[in-house]
Image: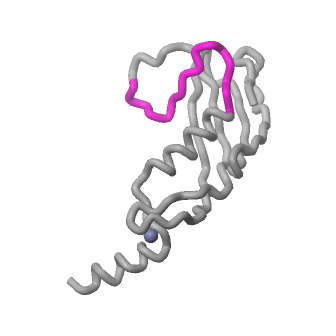
Amino acid sequence: MKIVYDKIGQSEKPFELTLNGVTLEGTLAKSGYHRVKLEGNLEGQVELCCDRCGDMYHYDMKYPLKLTLSDEVIETKDDLDIIEFLNGVVDLEFIVQSEIASVQNEYHYCKKCENNEEEFEKEF
Ligand SMILES: [Zn+2]
């Protein structure tokens, strides 16, 4: 789902899209000359591969998402929650895709291994 930057107004515009089993539901509203505020919730299941035993398992993704979108180059990179859309088009699929990728790129254990680790720690 792509939304032209200039069509986003001051009043919150609701949207919803699902990509690879993950739904992002929220609103977009202009918050400054080159800024759009995205507030929403991500919910869905992603398939992960355990970093310890290699098993595939499902991970329930559910958390609120607050981002600032900009159509100009951000000079200060202090705020990691700013995403640049320099061609003037907000690509919501890209946002969902990068959220899924960041979960997949984290180091993660399946439930079985998580429990094993707890037992392991108790021995010391
Ligand atoms: Zn595992």
Between 103 and 65, the residue placed more toward the observer is 103
Residue lying at the far bottom in this picture: please name it: 123
Seen in the picture, residue 17 relative to 49 is either above or below; the reply is: above
Seen in the picture, residue 47 relative to 67 is either above or below; the reply is: below
Seen in the picture, residue 41 relative to 111 is either above or below; the reply is: above
Question: In x, y percent, where is residue 93?
Answer: 67, 35
Residue drawn at 54 percent across, 64 percent down: 56
Residue drawn at 57 percent across, 30 percent down: 68
Question: In x, y percent, where is residue 99?
Answer: 56, 43
Q: How many marks?
A: 0
Residue 38 relative to residue 106: left or right: right
Tell me the quadrant of the picture where the N terminus can be found: top right
- In the rendered image, residue 19 lying in the magenta stretch gets the answer no
Magenta residues span 77-92
- In the rendered image, residue 78 lying in the magenta stretch gets the answer yes
Residue 24 relative to residue 76: left or right: right
Tell me the quadrant of the picture where the C terminus can be found: bottom left
Residue drawn at 35 percent across, 79 percent down: 118
Question: In x, y percent, where is residue 43?
Answer: 67, 54
Q: How is the image coloured?
A: one colour
Seen in the picture, residue 114 relative to 19 is either above or below; the reply is: below
Ligand 1 falls in which quarter? bottom left
Between 93 and 10, the residue placed more toward the observer is 93
